[in-house]
Amino acid sequence: MKDNLLEVNNLKKYFPVLKGVFQKKVGDIKAVDNISFSIKRGEIFGLVGESGCGKSTTGRTILNLIAPTGGSVVFEGKTIFDVENNYEISDEEMRKLRKDMQIVFQDPFASLDPRMNVGDIISEGMLKHKIYNKRDAINKTKELLEMCGLTASNIKKYPHEFSGGQRQRIGIARSIALNPKFIVGDEPIAALDVSIQSQILSLLQKLIEELNLTFLFISHDLNVVRYFCDQIAVMYLGSFVEVGTSEQLFDNPIHPYTQALLSAVPASMPSEIKKRILLEGDVPSPANPPEGCKFHTRCPYTKEICTEKVPELKSVDGGNLVSCHLYS
């Protein structure tokens, strides 16, 4: 049985709401609100939900790219931060850990420095961490370009000379340059043409298998996570509403929000008839989320307890973990 590479416990990330001339704090935007999960070594864990639900913030907080408000993250048995116990890894230890924890950003152009050529972009981390000398770093960079579907002759070119798909390949090459164990893919195909998306997914799948990577895949495309991920968590307003294996989640969605999301996925066959579940109202503001279950303002099955008490995330019939009072 595989051990857990990453453990996230009660993670929170709130952004202050400031008003007035003196920028007085009047509230918080609860981008990530008390989520817990673990990812086994070699597993692809999917994070899905509507835009603004906190997916990207979750990924960046786990990597300590933005400071957490609460909770803890443990990577390979080493605590990166534990807010409740007032502990945070030192800057020097975090720098060393960066080799093992990398990220592929959503926008392949904004994430690449336009003043640096491809060789410098990919080799920068190798030289910073003193993994290779200059000459070996150049040779390794050429090898990585070839591995990611680009020719080594591109090493002197600049980001603006490439297409969106090629730029994302450069970003992926940079992310694996330090031989990491864990990568966060922050919607890595969202900004690409549909024809290019499948190529990038195939590349990621190949690299995950060849390099034995553990992957947190953030996306709003349910069809992609269905076939790409082992485990999937569905987020709504900063919290998990359902967690399960890809097969469990798509064959037997339990939470009303998950059911509504899956009903919007186009049918795979023209002859297949799907009943669309339309949710009423808009997504509430994360600065002022509803009391009790955050989904109760749009749920067709709301009961009185839903407006008063936050449901626990627990297993239903030994299957999916679900946060819903319908299954209490």
Image (cartoon, rainbow, N blue to C red):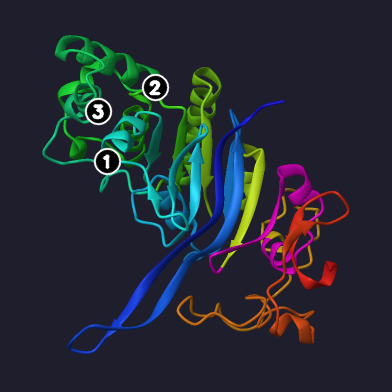
Who's the residue at 23% across and 83% down the image? 23
On the image, the x and y values in percent for residue 279 come to: 67, 77
Give the amino acid type for the residue marked by disc 3 in the picture: Gly
Residue 236 as seen in the image, left or right of residue 86: right
Hey, which quadrant is residue 131 in on the image?
Answer: top left
Position of 294 relative to 78 (above/below): below
Residue at the limit of the structure toward the right, as seen here:
317
Label 3 with label 2: CB-CB less than 8 Å:
no
Q: Which residue is mark 1?
A: 91
Residue 255 appearing in the image: yes
Q: Is residue 43 magenta?
A: no
**Toward the viewer: 243 or 253?**
243
Residue 62 as seen in the image, left or right of residue 119: right
On the image, the x and y values in percent for residue 121 come to: 21, 31
Q: Which residue is mark 3?
A: 125
Q: Which residue is mark 2?
A: 179
**Region in magenta:** 237-261
Position of 32 relative to 124 (above/below): below
